[in-house]
Image (cartoon, rainbow, N blue to C red):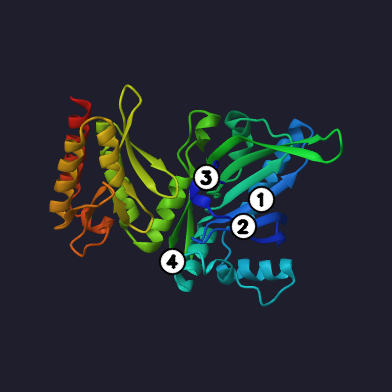
Amino acid sequence: MAEIEPAYRPLVSVCTELNTSAGSVDNVWITPEGGLILGECKLIRNPQSRREVVAQALDYARAVTGWHFEDLQNAARNARKDQAFSLWNLVREQTDLQEEQFCDAIERRLRFGRIMLLIISDGIHEGVEALASYLQLHAGVHASLALLDLSIWEGVGGGYLIVPRIPLRTVLVERGIVTLEGERGRFIAPQPASSSTSMLKTATASESEFYAQLDQRLPGQADKLKGFVLSLKPFGIEPEFGKSLFLRWQSQDGSTLSAGTIEPTGSIWLLKTVTDARIAGNQEAAERYLEKVASLIHGSVKRYENGTIDVRGSDDRSIRLPTLLQFPAEWKDAIANLVRDISGK
């Protein structure tokens, strides 16, 4: 999963053969942050079977969309034949969420259908364009689809060699939006698209997973951060999503600069900003940037014995996103000045 979608790590196995109204899901995993992954394993011999297995996986996603946490847990208990089984006990030592927060994270993903689908086969070779014609039939599913091809070779002396390949990292299937108003849901159809491929948003599922985790911990901050990140685009800052959000700027010669690393917990780190600027030959620009950020939050610039430099908040802890986002214009200007100083423009 590190190569497919870093935000969905680590995978924790829940069960096999999870029963749904669309059939039994081959494999089910969760993450300590409440991510949900459904895996479908099939031997594929022709284009028709390739389409069928993807459609089947999407049927699974549609079948569990609208479930509650207890529905998933009960289905897992039945699959495992263990009525004492607890999803929380699988992850409690690997997460900083409380049990109530974890259950709510699973609940929200089920209600919205925000699920990662992992197709594992020995013969998927179709790209996004070929998938578009039948992915668009699954309205209301907000799933992410990734394909993992396992080429199986029989060894001369016995045994097998299995070679993994990722023909498609992620497609976001977003044919419509389900909005929740209290306990009632409402489906909003998307605007008509000009082509079949525009039905698919080819983006990283780590983006939606990152914002889901952030919103779980800090309600309301995800939308604010999305707007702020968008405002940085004129300066060449592009978001890179993994388990954290990296604010990246890249020069014409290919060198990169980090304007900050934002964790889904809401912590912000500027350590790499100084390192990147030092490599670019202008550490002073990064230090001015850190000083400006520190002044906004009434924090301080900390210098460590190993040579690293970072900003700490007024409580001498990491920068907190809600605090810094109180000054979006000033933070944006500081980033613009940093890019200008490093680029020499």
> Mark 4: which amino acid?
Asp
Q: CA distance from mark 2 to mark 1?
A: 8 Å
Q: Amino acid at mark 3?
A: Glu
* Rendered image quadrant of residue 79: bottom right
Give residue 91's position: percent from left, percent from top. 55, 66
> Residue at position x 70%, y 59% from top?
21
Neighbours of disc 4 within 10 Å: few (<14), some (14-19), many (20+)? few
Residue type for callout 2 = Trp
Which residue is the site of mark 3?
5
The mark found on residue 29 in the picture is 2
Q: Tag 3's secondary structure?
A: loop
Residue 311 tag number: none
- As measured in the structure, the alpha-carbon distance from the residue carrying label 3 to the one carrying label 4 is 21 Å
In this view, the mark in front (4 or 2)? 4
Residue 267 picture location, percent across and down? 32, 56
> Which residue is denoted by mark 4 in the rendering?
96
Please report contact status of discs 2 and 1: CB closer than 8 Å, yes or no: yes
- Label 3 neighbour load within 10 Å: few <14, some 14-19, many 20+: many
